[in-house]
Image (cartoon, helix red, strand yellow):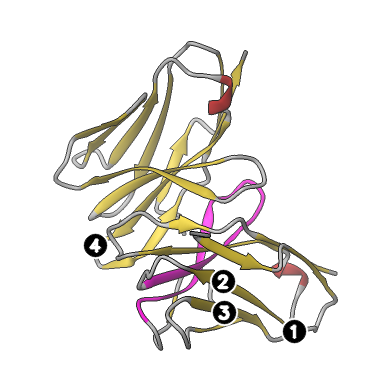
Amino acid sequence: SQQGEEDPQALSIQEGENATMNCSYKTSINNLQWYRQNSGRGLVHLILIRSNEREKHSGRLRVTLDTSKKSSSLLITASRAADTASYFCATDAQRNNNDMRFGAGTRLTVKP
Amino acid sequence: NAGVTQTPKFRVLKTGQSMTLLCAQDMNHEYMYWYRQDPGMGLRLIHYSVGEGTTAKGEVPDGYNVSRLKKQNFLLGLESAAPSQTSVYFCASSYSYYNEQFFGPGTRLTVL
């Protein structure tokens, strides 16, 4: 069963706009990771946030984590056409931290 | 550095045939993983390894076997392929469970 679930399933925006994707999970975690997948390619790691952290930044990416609500969000600011991809959150489970569970992903389309 | 490589990139099998997928990493990572990705779904963990000579079951292990005889290689075997195993298979590696995972480019397998 999937641990993380992304919302929305698909998002279409204009270049320059911000994109926000959400991830909800069910059980307590040690860390949460966001990955990006371009069509037909493998996943690329974006950001890892630990359960004792609330926010992390990397370039145009901002990730927040709310462990009380068991949710995380990924914000991409000033989006570009090259940001078009699927974005996945992945969580471990505290009881078995070797077992990462991925959500079904958010398909982001950035129109030029 | 090549990172994570997968062989082959594409394969078509008939029901009942067997095959082995090879994953190799040159980053000296301890942890290696095999996932499958089906349309509209996230990645699901098949098997993983926390070091040379070790393997463990993930979320969907049935119908697959794995071996980690060398630290840099992780093999995924299908003894008797079934149409339900048609999928894209991704290998990944990481330094430890709380570090980012590096993914290979994937193997697209079709079982007729």
Disc 3 sits on a residue from what chain? B
| Lateral position of residue A40 relative to residue B91, left or right | right
Q: Which residue is mark 4?
A: A94
Residues behind callouts 4 and 1 on a single chain: no
Q: Position of residue B112 (x, y in %)?
A: 85, 69
Amino acid type of the residue tagged 2 in the rendering: Cys
Comes first in the chain, label 1 or label 2: 1
CA neighbours of label 1 inside 10 A, class few (<14), some (14 to 19), many (20+): few
Near mark 4 (Cα within 10 A), the count class, few <14, some 14-19 or many ≥20, is few
**Precedes in sequence: disc 3 or disc 1:** 1
Left or right relative to B95: residue B21: right
Give the labeled residue for mark 3: B75
- Give, as a three-letter code, the residue at label 4: Gln
Relative to A50, does residue B77 appear above or below in the rendering?
below
Magenta part of the chain? B31-51
Which is more toward the observer, B26 or B86?
Answer: B26
